[in-house]
Image (cartoon, rainbow, N blue to C red):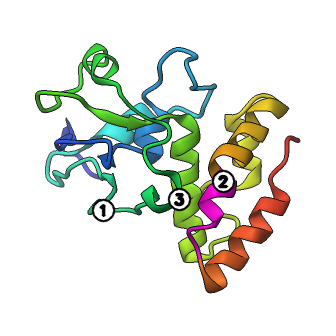
Amino acid sequence: MNKAPLIQQRIPVTSPALYLSGIQALNLRENGIDDPTGDWHFVNAFFTYADQPQDVPLYGAGGAWIDTHESLGARGIRDLSAIVCKQELVAPEGPVWVANFYRAIADIVALDARAQRSPGMASVSTINQWLDTPEEIAHLKQDYLTPLAAQFQGDSAAWMARFLEEVRYR
């Protein structure tokens, strides 16, 4: 067990094309504004051990994870500087661009599709824990996952097609 103290991961400069997503975005929400409930792990999302310093990973063009701009553009990416400040997170001057809840889920699904990982980080069961209503699931599927599927080819496209068939409210 690591006994080093926890420190905040550095939040790099962001933009609408290079933004926070994944678990970090799921932990920054605008009190019901396009952000349903979720499974919060704030410390895991923004802190690390002092002897293992690291930056918060970014999504998008040139990011550490995956770029979904090809299929989703800037859909669901918004400035959450005020929320970041309210959470007392240290961030660079200027806007802190963060995926909304639906875009964060889509970005995680994109990672799963690329790796063809089932069940993935955003399994249908997990999505049903994060989203509370049939309407939220339908919004995710229609406005985020279906356009996202067009981004993939080959085995990843086949994985995405199977996944889309499974996504439903349970």
Q: Amino acid at mark 3?
A: Ser
Q: Main secondary structure of the magenta part?
A: helix
Residue 148, percent from left and from top: 60, 59
Mark 3 or mark 2: name the one nearer the start of the chain.
3
In the picture of the structure, the residue carrying the numbered disc 1 is 64
How busy is the neighbourhood of tag 2: few (under 14 within 10 Å), some, or many (20 plus)?
many
- From the viewer's side, name the closer residue of 43 and 51: 43
Q: Which residue is pictured at 43% across the width and 56% down the height?
A: 69
Residue 150 part of the magenta-drawn span: yes
Q: Amino acid at mark 1?
A: Ala
> Considering only vertical position in the picture, is 167 above or below 128?
below
Q: Which residue is pictured at 29% across the width and 16% down the height?
A: 82
Residue range in magenta is 145-152
In the picture of the structure, the residue carrying the numbered disc 3 is 71
Mark sitting on residue 145: 2
Q: Amino acid at mark 2?
A: Leu
The CA distance from mark 1 to mark 3 is: 18 Å
Q: Quadrant of the C terminus?
A: top right
Secondary structure beneath dot 3 equals: helix
